[in-house]
């Protein structure tokens, strides 16, 4: 295992006859410690796959440097970088057995037969490919999607690489299998202690698996932090809206001073005040300079609860109720904005079309600059 360091890494695709060049990755700098599990996450087209492919050597670098261990690998061909990549589509050879699929890369590199056998057996055991059925003798078409992805993992493991790179490895699996494989990859990381860099657009995968998450948008790093810091202290509105499901609610409004402190007044698009939330002193740091200025208030759906009408509660017109069993999602609109509440109370469909009141947890508020989207702290 080894650390991986990216310095000002950029990728610019030249475009047709040099016109409309596309900046896919824009001066990305990251330090991934030896043994760390880092997830690159972001919406489609944000540059995460291109970043991973540059680390693998499958894509040329436009500028910047990549170090794997202590070596700059900018000019090192992929096969000499000592990393293993696991893809979404497994990329197994259909005519080979599972055993040969796992052994083939080592055979090409001239490893002794006995060493190959030992490594394949060890990986197969760790990944549960030997029991209850011995899958080593099967061809890929006789395996389920989850089993195929396990073989692809095994093929990467036998190489004992300096780092593992994963490109959306779970996207082809059904929802139940995704959850199982997610846990399996996390366990594998604990067992092997290897450096792992994992690309996904799925924020749940990122939150559950990562030591550290790098949120990307438009080729740039938006925030590079632990899962809990991303959730509790998003650096900007993009990160706040991307991490969390359902996403954070945003209300545009204005901060006002009152005789006892500060309050947030939500404003409708026409500039009318529709509800007012008194702020507790814990949530007002950094807000003093924003008095009477427009700001965006962010509240996660799980930090809003249905309420009989306490101070700071607001009225919503409910348009959809989604009972999920353990929890219920209630979708509605205030006078100015859409809003989702996630409650453990079992609300019924009969609420749809009715009015109800929601109360935000005043200690879990986020404020963002209207123009830049940066968090105000
Ligand atoms: P996805 O989740 O959809 O795979 P991504 O975040 O991995 O998205 P990339 O595949 O890294 O995004 O692409 C980043 C940007 O670069 C996109 O806008 C994409 O259209 C563009 N891009 C990728 N490959 C090329 C190419 N060969 N030529 C021109 N533009 C490209």
Image (cartoon, rainbow, N blue to C red):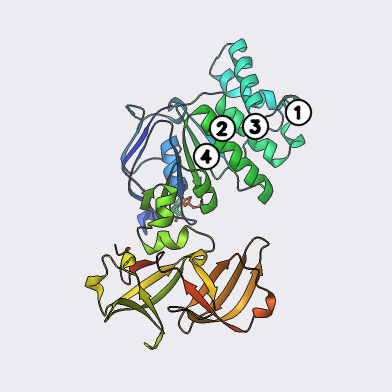
Can residue 163 be spotted in the picture?
yes
For ligand 1, tell me if the residue under mark 2 lies within 8 Å.
no
Rounded to the nearest whole Å, what is the CA distance between mark 2 and mark 3? 13 Å
Residue 227 appears at what percent x and percent y? Answer: 44, 49
Q: Are marks 4 and 1 in contact (CB under 8 Å)?
A: no
Quadrant of the frame with the N terminus: top left
Rounded to the nearest whole Å, what is the CA distance between mark 4 and mark 2? 13 Å
Residue at screen point 69% across, 36% down = 147
Q: Nearer the viewer, mark 2 or mark 1?
A: 2
Rounded to the nearest whole Å, what is the CA distance between mark 4 and mark 3? 14 Å
Lower position in the chain sequence, tag 4 or tag 1: 1
Query: What label does residue 188 carry, if any?
Result: 2
Rounded to the nearest whole Å, what is the CA distance between mark 2 and mark 1? 23 Å
- Tag 1: Cα neighbours inside 10 Å, few (<14), some, or many (≥20)? some
Lower position in the chain sequence, tag 2 or tag 3: 3
**What residue sits right under mark 3 in the picture?**
151
Lower position in the chain sequence, tag 1 or tag 3: 1
Residue at screen point 44% across, 55% down = 231
- Tag 3: Cα neighbours inside 10 Å, few (<14), some, or many (≥20)? many
**What residue sits right under mark 4 in the picture?**
166
Q: Please tell me whether residue 5 is drawn above or below residue 175 in the rendered image.
A: above
Left or right: where does residue 190 sit relative to residue 146? left
Quadrant of the frame with the C terminus: bottom left
The quarter of the displayed image where residue 217 is located: bottom left
Quick one: SS at disc 4?
strand
Q: Nearer the viewer, residue 198 or 213?
A: 213
Rounded to the nearest whole Å, what is the CA distance between mark 1 and mark 3? 11 Å
**What residue sits right under mark 1 in the picture?**
138
Residue at screen point 68% across, 29% down = 128
Quick one: SS at disc 1?
loop
């Amino acid at each position: 295992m080894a650390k991986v360091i990216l310095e000002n890494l950029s990728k610019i695709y030249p475009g047709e006859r040099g016109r409309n060049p596309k900046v896919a990755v824009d001066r990305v700098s990251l330090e991934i410690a030896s043994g760390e599990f880092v997830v690159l996450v972001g919406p489609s087209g944000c540059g995460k796959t291109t970043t991973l492919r540059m680390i693998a050597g499958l894509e040329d670098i436009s500028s910047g440097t990549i170090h794997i261990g202590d070596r700059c690998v900018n000019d090192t061909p992929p096969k000499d970088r000592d990393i293993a990549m696991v893809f979404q589509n497994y990329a197994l050879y259909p005519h080979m057995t599972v055993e040969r699929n796992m052994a083939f890369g080592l055979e090409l590199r001239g490893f002794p037969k006995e060493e190959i056998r030992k490594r394949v057996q060890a990986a197969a055991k760790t990944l549960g490919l030997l029991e209850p059925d011995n899958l080593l003798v099967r061809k890929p078409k006789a395996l389920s999607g989850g089993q195929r992805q396990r073989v692809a993992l095994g093929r990467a493991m036998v190489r004992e690489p300096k780092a593992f790179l994963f490109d959306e490895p779970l996207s082809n699996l059904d929802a139940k299998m995704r959850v199982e494989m997610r846990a399996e990859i996390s366990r594998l990381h604990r067992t092997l202690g290897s450096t792992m860099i994992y690309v996904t657009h799925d924020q749940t995968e990122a939150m559950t698996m990562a030591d550290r998450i790098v949120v990307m948008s438009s080729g740039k790093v938006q925030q590079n932090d632990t899962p809990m810091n991303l959730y509790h202290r998003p650096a900007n509105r993009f990160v706040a809206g991307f991490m969390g499901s359902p996403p954070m609610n945003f209300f545009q409004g204005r901060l006002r001073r009152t005789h006892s402190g500060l309050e947030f007044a939500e404003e409708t698009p026409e500039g009318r005040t529709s509800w007012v939330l008194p702020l507790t002193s814990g949530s007002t740091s950094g807000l003093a300079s924003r008095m009477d200025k427009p700001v965006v208030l962010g509240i996660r759906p799980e930090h809003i609860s249905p309420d009989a009408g306490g101070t700071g509660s607001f009225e919503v017109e409910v348009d959809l109720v989604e009972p999920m069993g353990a929890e219920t999602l209630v979708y509605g609109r205030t006078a100015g904005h859409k809003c989702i509440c996630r409650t453990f109370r079992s609300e019924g469909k009969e609420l749809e079309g009715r009015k109800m009141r929601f109360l935000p947890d005043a200690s879990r508020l986020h404020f963002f600059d209207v123009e830049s989207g940066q968090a105000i702290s």
